[in-house]
Image (spheres, rainbow, N blue to C red):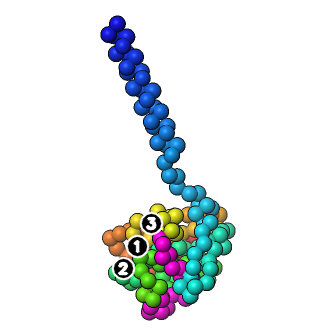
Amino acid sequence: MSIRLSALSKACAAVLFAATVIAAVGSAPRALAADDRLQFTGTTLSGAPFNGASLQGKPAVLWFWAPFCPFCNAEAPGVSQVAAANPGVTFVGVAGHSDVGAEQTFVSKYGLNFTNLNDADGSIWARYNVPWQPAYVFYRADGSSTFVNNPTSAMSQQELSDRVAALRS
């Protein structure tokens, strides 16, 4: 009798464990597909609306930055030059963790002549699971993307240029 009860207890425990795992997996947040991630709206630093869906079907670079970030400050001149040298690739900066005035000063200081968004509530950063800045999402025209986030150094201008060139091939 005790052997059957022990076996029954183990079986019940296994079923309970399986049900718990299934419930956890079913309710876990899922990463959004590349196309779904572009379904966002934002506001540019000048206050104009921006629709992320406008990037679909195009090579594009999302650059997540903050004006106080030393690596972002190191990257900004290179980002500006690579963006200017690649008019067929859409660059969009996504500024966070600061006020619009500081973000506008940063954009002016480095001559960032592409769209920059003020992600005041962090919703775009959260959509891409960006834990810290700087980070990049490189989109190919087919919608596939690569996320790059290195918390210990700035991306070199050469690496950025190479990654952007790969978007066109």
Q: Using residue 81 as the reference point, say whether residue 74 is left or right of it.
A: left
Q: Which mark is residue 130?
A: 3
Q: Which mark is residue 156?
A: none
Q: Which mark is residue 133?
A: 1
Q: Using residue 6 as the reference point, say whether residue 130 is left or right of it.
A: right
Q: Are marks 1 and 2 in contact (CB under 8 Å)?
A: yes
Q: Using residue 49 as the reference point, say whether residue 110 is left or right of it.
A: left
Quadrant location, the C terminus: bottom right
What secondary structure is marked by label 1? Answer: loop
Q: Earlier in the sequence, mark 3 or mark 2?
A: 2
The residues tagged by marks 3 and 2 sit, at their Cα atoms, a distance apart of 14 Å
Query: Residue at 60% across / 68% down in the picture?
Result: 40
**Residue found farthest to the top:** 1
Q: Which residue is mark 2?
A: 69
Asked if the magenta segment contains residue 121, the reply would be yes
Instruction: Find residue 110 and report its image quarter.
Output: bottom left
Would residue 81 be visible to someone looking at this image? no
- CA neighbours of label 3 inside 10 A, class few (<14), some (14 to 19), many (20+): some
Which of the two residues, 109 or 99, is positioned nearer the viewer here? 99
Q: Earlier in the sequence, mark 1 or mark 2?
A: 2
The residues tagged by marks 3 and 1 sit, at their Cα atoms, a distance apart of 7 Å
Q: For the residue marked with disc 3, what is the amino acid?
A: Val
User: Does 33 appear above or below 75?
Assistant: above
Q: Specify start and end residues of the magenta stretch as a single range.
A: 104-122
Q: Are marks 3 and 1 in contact (CB under 8 Å)?
A: yes
What secondary structure is marked by label 3? Answer: loop
Which of the two residues, 139 or 25, is positioned nearer the viewer here? 25
Asked if the magenta segment contains residue 146, the reply would be no
